[in-house]
Amino acid sequence: MSVLIPPDEAHDGALLAGINTTPLVDVMLVLLIIFLITIPVVTSSVMLTLPHERFAPNQQRPDSIIISVDRQGQLFWFDTPLPDADALARRLSDVASRAEQPSVQIRGDRQASFEGVGRVLAACERAGIAKVAFITEPSARQ
């Protein structure tokens, strides 16, 4: 703490109008130290070299099942159209009951709604299919 002593004894009864800046400076230094410590932690990121987009050839096993969804939401088991979602569920439950489950690969048309593909995923989950994959086309840029 600091005390301001008047220069002469003539002004004994006068008020001293001075601001004690020591607490202000202390608080500002503490805040400065806190910001110097926390800002590098918040702004730092790990420098990575991310891989380029490349598609490996699709490893199709002979027992893989391909379910397709066209633009209108029609479902196909390989090339055979399915009449409704119940037919898909029956076929998937038959596949799930096998001793060695094949993988189910879903092909969705680019213009197909996500709802159709989501129904296929939900049916696979309800049937207990362990391996589900999406078939895509590789992009032109490598």
Image (spheres, grey):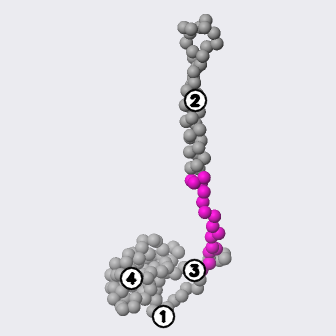
Q: Position of residue 140 (x, y in %)?
A: 65, 77
Q: Residue 70 or 127: which is nearer the viewer? A: 127
Q: CA distance from mark 4 to mark 1?
A: 17 Å
Q: Quadrant of residue 121?
A: bottom left
The tally of labels here is 4
User: Mark on residue 62?
Assistant: 1
Query: Residue 43 in the image: x percent, y percent?
Result: 59, 54
Mark 2 and mark 4 lie on one chain; the one further toward the N terminus is: 2
Instruction: Tell which residue pokes out farthest to the bottom in this image.
Output: 62
Q: Which residues lie in the magenta part?
A: 40-55
Instruction: Name which of mark 1 and mark 2 comes first in the sequence.
Output: 2
Q: Disc 4 and disc 3: Cα gap in Å?
A: 24 Å
Which numbered marker is on residue 14?
none
Residue identifier under label 3: 137
Which kind of residue does numbered mark 2 sit on?
Answer: Thr
Mark nearer the viewer, 1 or 3: 1
Q: Quadrant of residue 102?
A: bottom left
Q: Which residue is mark 4?
A: 129
Of marks 4 and 1, which one's residue comes earlier in the chain?
1
Q: Residue at x 61, y 6 (%)?
A: 10
Q: Are marks 2 and 4 in contact (CB under 8 Å)?
A: no
- Which of 24 and 3 lies nearest the eye of the viewer? 3
Residue corresponding to mark 2: 22
Q: Is residue 138 visible?
A: yes
Whether tag 4 and tag 1 are in contact, CB under 8 A, the answer is no
Work out how far the residue at label 3 is from the one at label 2, CA to CA, in angstroms: 69 Å
Give me the residue at 36% from left, 86% from top.
96
Q: Is residue 114 above or below residue 37?
A: below
